[in-house]
Amino acid sequence: PFSNRIRDGRFCFRGQMVEMPPNVVGQAHVEHGHGWQSAWSIVKQSGTAATIELAHEADEWPFAYTARQEFSLVPDGLAITLSVQNTGLRPMPVGLGLHPYFPRSRATRLTAAVGQMWATDCEVMPTALVSPPATCGFDRGVAIDTVDLDNAFVDWQRQATIAWPDRGASLTMTASAPLSFLVVYSPSGADFFCAEPVSHCTDAFNLAAAGRDDTGMLVLESGTEVSATVRFACSITQQGTGKGEAT
């Protein structure tokens, strides 16, 4: 029920300390909640759609919830709806996030309107909210192969375009509220990158407990639900060169 990392797997919420065991080998910070390491149940499926569900009972994460993912093929691409319902008796902190991977070459460009960026330390934990460096002018389009990032950008306008001119293709990713943060992960030398629509910044629960009101952390009362949809629309622009060169 959260995106990215929680420092040392610990945070305090409304007077209760929550402590979770590490879920990534060699890392003290708990990452990406439960969904990516759990078995989901198929609720329904057809030739163009599928819905899966995950029910969590309170344990080290002392809040019960049910999460759902709905996948739908549409004429120009794919729509994914994420939702989580608080099935327990107490309020629950929560965040939503999608972690898609995209192919990358020297020609690949990402365009998105974003605001400030969370700078990070050597453990990819947030340190300060700063203006992005000049190399991260995503509103003008950035060649992904020229930046080495693992950062959350705030005030994302919930639309991003990825262009592969060498393939003659592009993709527009559009998200609904509350996915107003965009995490860009572009590790140096990799043949992939990630552009992740999320509802909150890294370590949002601890930052909120420290008094920040701009983390994006949501609170679900008992029985309530939050959902968000991300749409991926594909377009063939022209015949690509296949060489992976910037043009």
Image (cartoon, rainbow, N blue to C red):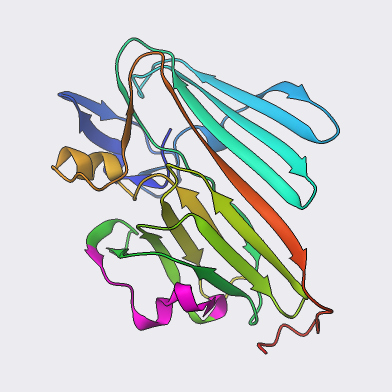
The x, y position of residue 209, in whole percent, is 17, 38
Residue 95 counted in the magenta span: no
Q: Could you tell me which residue is drawn at 30 percent across and 56 percent down?
A: 125
Relative to 91, say whether 195 is above or below: below
Kindly tell me whether residue 75 is visible in this rendering. Answer: yes
Q: Could you tell me which residue is drawn at 20 percent across and 31 percent down?
A: 12
Q: How many marks?
A: 0
Relative to 243, say whether 50 is above or below: above
The x, y position of residue 235, in whole percent, is 75, 64
Instruction: Give the side of residue 14 with respect to residue 231, left or right.
Output: left
The x, y position of residue 129, in whole percent, is 24, 62
20 or 46: nearer the eye?
Answer: 46
Instruction: Give the side of residue 131 with respect to residue 236, left or right.
Output: left
Q: Quadrant of the N terminus?
A: top left
Residue 192 falls in which quadrant of the image? bottom right
Kindly tell me whether residue 193 is visible in this rendering. Answer: no
Residue 104 falls in which quadrant of the image? bottom right
Residue 141 counted in the magenta span: yes
Q: Which residues are magenta?
A: 129-145
Residue 123 falls in which quadrant of the image? bottom left
Instruction: Give the side of residue 77 with respect to residue 116, left or right.
Output: right
156 or 120: nearer the eye?
Answer: 156
Residue lying farthest top?
89
Q: Could you tell me which residue is drawn at 39 percent across and 62 percent down?
A: 151
Relative to 97, say whether 52 is above or below: above
Q: Could you tell me which residue is drawn at 81 percent across and 77 percent down?
A: 238
94 or 23: nearer the eye?
Answer: 94
The x, y position of residue 71, in whole percent, is 69, 37
Q: Quadrant of the C terminus?
A: bottom right
